[in-house]
């Protein structure tokens, strides 16, 4: 059995819910990532994605410089443990239609597992795995 902890991403980028959409977009750009875990009191408060910024922020005509992450963050976050089976993580992603799962150990954020991580681990010859393993092109 392959566990989530064996292949999760541990280089996490987190932000506070009081940070702005502009700050999150800049962090995503500078880190070449598409999501940031929003934390509060050492735990996961939510996830903000580049799509959230677009759909819940810009498309709703919110001012990105003054809109706080906690105003648009996805709050009902499904998490996994580093000891969970990779297949179970994939099943959770499918069931809840999410592409990322924060990895939490004893209430503390320790990693993030994405659909791309699972593809690289479970189906290394797949197109998704090939794309996910490449360096960003933008």
Image (cartoon, helix red, strand yellow):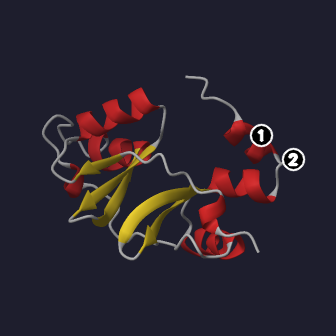
Residue that appears at 34% across and 34% down:
27
Q: Position of residue 71 (x, y in %)?
A: 20, 56
Where residue 96 appears, x then y in whole percent?
Answer: 54, 72
Q: Is residue 88 left or right of residue 53?
A: right
Toward the viewer: 129 or 21? 129
98 or 57: nearer the eye? Answer: 98
The residue furthest left is 66
Q: Residue furthest right?
A: 125
Residue at horizontal 26 percent and vertical 46 percent from the top: 60
- 18 versus 54 height, above or below: below
Mark 1 to mark 2 CA distance (whole Å)? 7 Å
Q: Which mark is residue 116?
A: none
Sequence-wise, the earlier of marks 1 and 2 is: 2
State if disc 2 and disc 1 touch (CB < 8 Å): yes
Callout 2 crowding tier (Cα within 10 Å): few <14, some 14–19, many ≥20: few
**Residue in the image at 40% along x and 35% along y:** 28
On the rendered structure, is 73 left or right of 68?
Answer: right
- Percent from the top left, x then y, of residue 58? 29, 39
Position above or below: 129 against 81: above
Position in image of residue 20 (x %, y %): 20, 41
Residue 130: mark in rendering: 1
- Is the C terminus in the top left, top right, bottom left or bottom right quadrant? top right
* Disc 2: which residue: 125
- In the picture, the quarter occupied by the N terminus is bottom right
In which quadrant of the rendered view does residue 98 lie?
Answer: bottom right
Mark 1, secondary structure of its residue: helix
Q: Element type at marker 2? A: loop
Residue at 82 percent across and 49 percent down: it is 124
- Quarter of the image where one finds residue 4: bottom right
Q: Quadrant of residue 115?
A: bottom right
Please say if 18 is above or below 74.
Answer: above
């Amino acid at each position: 059995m392959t566990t989530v902890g064996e292949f999760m991403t541990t280089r996490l980028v987190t932000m506070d819910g009081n940070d702005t959409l502009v700050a999150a977009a800049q962090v995503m750009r500078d880190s070449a990532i598409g999501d940031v875990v929003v934390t509060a009191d050492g735990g996961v408060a939510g996830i903000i994605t580049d799509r959230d910024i677009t759909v819940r922020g810009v498309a709703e005509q919110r001012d990105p410089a003054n809109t706080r992450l906690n105003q648009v963050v996805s709050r009902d976050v499904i998490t996994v443990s580093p000891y969970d089976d990779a297949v179970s993580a994939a099943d959770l992603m499918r069931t809840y239609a999410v592409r990322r799962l924060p990895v939490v150990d004893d209430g503390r954020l320790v990693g993030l597992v994405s659909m791309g991580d699972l593809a690289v681990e479970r189906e290394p010859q797949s197109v998704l795995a090939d794309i996910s393993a490449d360096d960003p092109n933008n």
